[in-house]
Amino acid sequence: MQGFRLNGSRVLEIDLAGDAVRASTGSMIAYTGDVTFKNAGMGGGDGLMAGLKRRAAGESVALMHCTGHGTVWFAKDAMEVLIVELNGDTLRVESEQLLALSDKLKTDVAFAGVRGASSGQGLFTTTVTGYGTVALLSAGGPPIALEVSPQFPLVVDPDAFVASQGQLNQSFVTDVSWRNLVGESSGEAFSLRFDGSGVVYIQPEER
């Protein structure tokens, strides 16, 4: 059974005992034992149809299979690492914020909504579903977990969004006022709004 653990705050350490994990391509920084690495394919290890769906949606995720007996250390761009356990639920995550996941978890692409009535542009996000462990990345410092309840919906900057978990409905809201204050006014400015019950993970640094 795999053991996901942190070595400091920016390095993920995983023990393999004949099983496999999937990790972001190029994120391995060291390993011991007998471990093999191979490309998980354009579907991220979930098959050809998943790959075609990702390509059509423009939501790519480059993963590698890590299999064998030993310990592997992963890191990416000195970003902070967060470990999240899934118990049959679904995590929605930005593909570039995904560091590693248990191989038994399933990844897919989900329609995230339309970014504003003016553009009509559809946006997509990566979903991870099942029972297992996921390691997320946060730029600029430790990730921040914000709880959402029916009484207190949450609005976040899409450039700071990392992932969301729980019974949440995501929508896009036009919110140019705060961008005006920092000189980022745009006709396409929008924010992400989350209603329901769950947790939203954000990072201190914008993409």
Image (cartoon, rainbow, N blue to C red):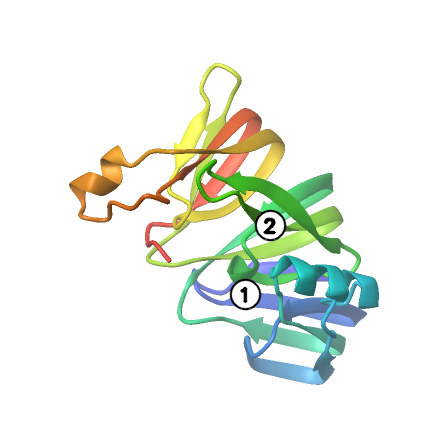
Report the residue at 56% width, 52% height from top: 83
What secondary structure is marked by label 1? strand
Q: Where residue 76 appears, x then y in whole percent?
A: 47, 71
Which image quarter: residue 95?
A: bottom right
Relative to residue 81, is residue 170 depicted above or below? Answer: above
Amino acid tagged 1: Leu
Which image quarter: residue 98?
A: bottom right
Q: Can residue 16 be spotted in the picture?
A: yes
Nearer the camera: disc 2 or disc 1:
2
Q: Where residue 116 appears, x then y in whole percent?
A: 46, 38
Report the residue at 44% width, 19% height from top: 152
Relative to residue 85, is residue 30 depicted above or below? Answer: below
Q: Where residue 128 appears, x then y in whole percent?
A: 69, 50
Relative to residue 9, is residue 191 depicted above or below? Answer: above
Relative to residue 45, is residue 194 depicted above or below? Answer: above
Q: Which mark is residue 124?
A: 2
Q: Which mark is residue 169?
A: none
- Residue farthest toward the top in the current orientation of the protein: 151
| Nearer to the camera, 147 or 74 | 147
**Quadrant of the image containing the C terminus:** bottom left
Amino acid tagged 2: Phe
What secondary structure is marked by label 2? strand
Q: Is residue 142 left or right of residue 180?
A: right
Q: Is residue 3 left or right of residue 48?
A: left
Q: Where residue 119 appears, x then y in whole percent?
A: 46, 44
Q: Can residue 47 be spotted in the picture?
A: no
Report the residue at 60% width, 38% height from top: 165
User: Neighbour class for label 2 at 10 Å: few (<14), some, many (≥20)?
Assistant: some
| Nearer to the camera, 92 or 14 | 92
Q: Is residue 190 left or right of residue 12?
A: left
Q: Which mark is residue 12?
A: 1
